[in-house]
Amino acid sequence: MDNLLEQIAPFQPTWHLGQQVMGLRKDEAAQTFIVETSKGTRITCKAIIIAAGAGAFGPKKPPLEDLEKYEDKCVFYYVKKRSDFKDKHLVIAGGGDSAVDWAVSLSEIAASVKVVHRRNKFRCAPDSEEKLRSLAQSGKVDLVIPYQLAALEGDDNGHLKAVHVETLEGEQRSLIADMLLPFYGLATSLGPLAKWGLALDRTTITINPTTGETSMPGVFAVGDVAGYDHKLKLILTGFSESAQAAHAAYKYVFPGQALHFEHSTTSGVQNLKK
């Protein structure tokens, strides 16, 4: 990413981060597109390249009452800074690699770590599970098995006090907790772009593999979200598709102008911009 940002810097791109494209419509009279985002940003453009990956990623959230009240305060679906959890009483829910690996790692700095899982079998690397069970035997980690999350207890300001769990048979426990980390994996969805009228093949956008163009002229798709026969979902493929889409989009951005294909590594950025 650092290298890509350095490579694109001379072209002075405008970034609109932390927002999702919600709407896309075409102004037939002006032959332009209008893109609207979740923050109310409106962008007018002549061509669009969709690089949405496998779709919009979001955490699989546990079905707990008042969960939203605690999110981003005491309930986190991923770890940004390990130090944020220092000296905290943690409850980690899940049995996959994320849950096990973070339980092992955070046990070094947390006041306590309790791992809640519905069965006594984990879906993770054998070495990670061995480390977790060794920590459990030494008392550094408490394996709360076989339990599932049942309810959250805290104050009106979203500060967590305890996490309530129960078995399928109804046996209940209350776990002291400052923070809850539910690691149940990610769910993907095409999101709003599924309603833009583009030809789709389940969770991918159908494109012309030689140009990247979708069923809507002027709109292109690249990377994992783009689909065609014999597609290889590789980063290398995504780069190639991006270059093809950029070249194919040129005629919409600069109609009637010839595209002189050059290389920035030999011609320089200034020559390309003229």
Image: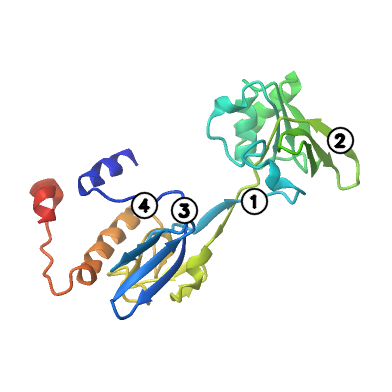
Q: Amino acid at mark 3?
A: Gln
Contact between marks 4 and 1 (CB within 8 A): the answer is no
- Position of residue 193 measured from the top left corner of the image (x, y, whole percent): 47, 67
Q: Could you tell which of marks 1 and 2 lies nearer the N-terminus? A: 1
Secondary structure beneath label 2: strand
Q: Nearer the viewer, mark 4 or mark 3?
A: 3
Q: Secondary structure at mark 1?
A: loop
Q: Nearer the viewer, mark 4 or mark 2?
A: 2
Mark toward the start of the polypeptide (2 vs 3): 3
Residue drawn at 61 percent across, 32 percent down? 102
Kind of residue indicated by mark 1: Lys
Q: Quadrant of residue 243?
A: bottom left
Q: Is residue 264 left or right of residue 66?
A: left
Residue tagged by mark 2? 173
Mark 1 or 3: in front is 3
Q: Is residue 35 above or below residue 31?
A: above
